Amino acid sequence: MKVLVLGAGAVGGYFGGRLIESGVDVTFLVRKKRQQQINGKGLFINSIHGDIQLEPKTLVSGEEVRTFDVIIFATKAQHLEGAIQAVEPYVGPSTTIIPLLNGISHIYRLQEVFGKDKIIGGFCFIETTLNDIGHVVQTSKSHQISFGELDGERSSRIESIQTLFSETSASFKLSDNILQDMWHKYLFITTLSGITTLMRSSVGPILEVKDGEKLTLQLFEEVASIMEAADAPIADDIVDKQMATMKMQHYNMKASMLRDIEKGISIEVDHLQGYLLTLADRFNLEVPLLRVIYQHLKVYEINLNKK
């Protein structure tokens, strides 16, 4: 099977690299500047799970138009529309698309463009970034992708993909309840990104300060209340479990959104916090902390766009 990874940044570069390391036929679809960087110096992954240096195949949109068996969307949500246009020439009748974006609304957009039959569920847990010279730097114990049919079926294509991914040093986990898993990840990442960007801090100091744990729990509860009102398939005890998970994060853990702010680049605020506030307004829910976080992040965007 031939795999196309959209993006060779922090997430795409890491997981695509691990697939290549295991012998999978992977091509990266990238921008021209990133292609020149990779073709000239290779792809470097500096990871607590082992460093690797690769010379992967790359494409720029429009080059060598051919179809792939699996396409992994490893781009930020704010780049989704451009990513869709870039990928369209490489989608064939039997292509399976695995999106790793945070949130949930992108699933509906991808289904609208490519058809429901081509889209499966997916997400990842990893702390990784690109450094100033384009190396992928991965620092978390967790380096997992979860994927599965949105209806939970153990289809033949899912089992084929599971076999393809089974020999990697990263964790590629087949889920029989991927839709619930995606909503749970959405809950966690919205809270993690929201509280760390609001405080401009990693998790450790936030939980250490007097009311930090209380505010984190409040944000979890506000987000969960929106999801419950929207009939999202979240577990009854998910807030308690995720609060416990938050406390287990290492002291310097930061959401990727905070790292993006520190770099002075665009963020996924409308896709994450914004979409949830749309649902909150629909159901007339009071979510004051989430609303403050959203306004705070939108002010960042306004100031960023003035530069």
Image (cartoon, rainbow, N blue to C red):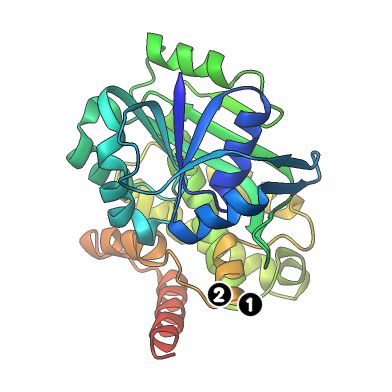
Nearer-the-camera pick, 240 or 190: 190
Residue type at mark 1 is Arg
Residue 32 image point, x, y percent: 44, 57
Tell me, for residue 200, which label it has, or none. 1
Residue 121 image point, x, y percent: 40, 33
Q: Is residue 158 left or right of residue 243?
A: left
Q: Residue 18, located in which quarter of the rendered image?
A: top right
Nearer-the-camera pick, 9 or 223: 9
Nearer-the-camera pick, 272 or 32: 32
Q: Relative to residue 1, is residue 187 depicted above or below?
A: below
Q: Relative to residue 39, is residue 152 depicted above or below?
A: above
Write down the residue under mark 2. Answer: 261
The kind of secondary structure element at disc 2 is helix
Whole-Å distance between the Cαs marked 2 and 1? 9 Å
Q: Is residue 9 left or right of residue 157?
A: right
Residue under the point 54% across and 17% down: 164
The kind of secondary structure element at disc 1 is loop
Residue type at mark 2 is Ile
Residue 156 appears in the rendering: yes
Residue 262 image point, x, y percent: 61, 76
